[in-house]
Image (cartoon, rainbow, N blue to C red):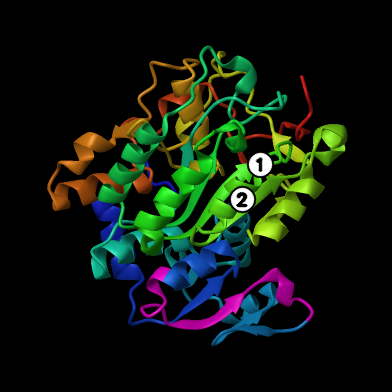
Amino acid sequence: MKYCSCNSAEDRTRDVILRFNPSEEYIVYGTGECYHFMKRFLGDLINIKFCIDKRASSGSYQIGKDKVFAPETLHNFIGNKIIIAANGAYYFEIRESLLKLGYSEELLCSAFEIATAWGMEYRKNIISMYVSFPILSACTLNCRGCIHYTDYHKKGFYLQKDEIKESIDLYFTCVDVVDQIQIFGGEPFLHRDLDEICLYISERYATRYHKMLVTTNGTIVPKVKVMENLSKCSNLVVSISDYSQTNEDRLSIDHLVELCGQAKVPYNINSNFYRSDSENLWFDCGNPNEKKEAIDVKSRFSNCALPGFGVFKNRYYYCPNSMFASITDIFPEGRDWLDLKRIAFLSRQERNAELLAWHLGFMKNGSLDFCSYCAGFGKWVNSNYIRAGEQL
């Protein structure tokens, strides 16, 4: 899904438009978040023949007007064009299975690419699947292998609400619609203005996002008033990371779930992190202060399965690992970000061109600066697993 080896984002987008356009019929592989993202923002343009999903192995089923069949069905349809509606490691798994089955690269396209290219061509919009807003670095846990490099921070941060609001406004000046907004830390429930920040996003931009996630480690039980305010936010979900296998005595998940129920705040509980093929495991990205062994960093970048995009103090980062390494001074010299203030003052055409290239992964040197210091996510670049939430 990253095309750092192509000539330009414009060329790639033009190629997608030529090969995949609304006049044709497509098989869609995957019926999870990416499928719903694509349907929400481009559903009237996409002519779906049928969908494929592993959950249909015991028999077909239907989602709205779309029929869903098992992957084995594809043997009868080699030659049809497929939109891979999956993200991260799921995308790479599906792509690999289709290539082995006999499909050519020309017949495959990701849902994210379709949304990016079609959004610009037919909606004149910059459409993104995900963005995160880190609001503080403080955390109640000190996990080995934390994706935010908690144990390596040279300086912490606690953003004031006005700083966060400025970044939110600049982001929505540049990006038209986004599927998921994630608010995280550290531990976001440690921020005294968390509920006000979420209310601000909801009141101003409810029509421009689908879901807002507040991601917590389940150690903090917020005040009733905080939960009452969160209940007023459009499509907000409290996403609880379940580290009970390593920290059961430190968690308050049951209490938090009870509070969510009382306030009528939707929630989910996760124990499968970043598609590590097994619950309660993380990928170990290694020491961010040490340059990794000499490898093809372009290949590491293009095959990394970590979901990206984050905003901190008006900087638009491509990768959350790089973002935290930069803002906590582990890797201050990195330039893996765009200046949203600069982008916001460009003409609409110039702004869209730059954001299009950024979203599709066209980096000047073919990778991010921080790729040389990170082992990456996903089994295509990293085979090192650690227990999720294990304390140092």
Question: Where 124 sits versus 161, above or below?
Answer: below
Dot 2 corresponds to which residue? 227
Task: Inspect the image, locate mark 2, and give the three-letter code of the amino acid beneath it.
Answer: Met
Question: Where 120 sits versus 305, above or below?
Answer: below
Dot 1 corresponds to which residue? 222
Residue, far left: 347
Q: Position of residue 84 (x, y in %)?
A: 52, 64
In the rendered image, which quarter contains the C terminus?
Answer: top right
Q: Which residues are magenta?
A: 41-58
Q: Dot 2: within a 10 Å radius of its alpha carbon, few (fewer than 14), some, or many (20 or more) residues?
A: many
Residue 57: say if magenta.
Answer: yes
Q: Residue at x 36, y 34 (%)?
A: 162
Q: Position of residue 54 (x, y in %)?
A: 71, 70
Q: Position of 44 compared to 347: left or right?
A: right
Q: Which of pointers 2 and 1 lies earlier in the amino acid sequence? A: 1
Cβ–Cβ under 8 Å for marks 2 and 1: yes
Q: Residue at x 59, y 56 (%)?
A: 237
Q: Nearer the viewer, residue 161 or 369?
A: 161
Q: Residue at x 46, y 15 (%)?
A: 329
Q: Position of 336 compared to 94: left or right?
A: left
Q: CA distance from mark 2 to mark 1?
A: 7 Å
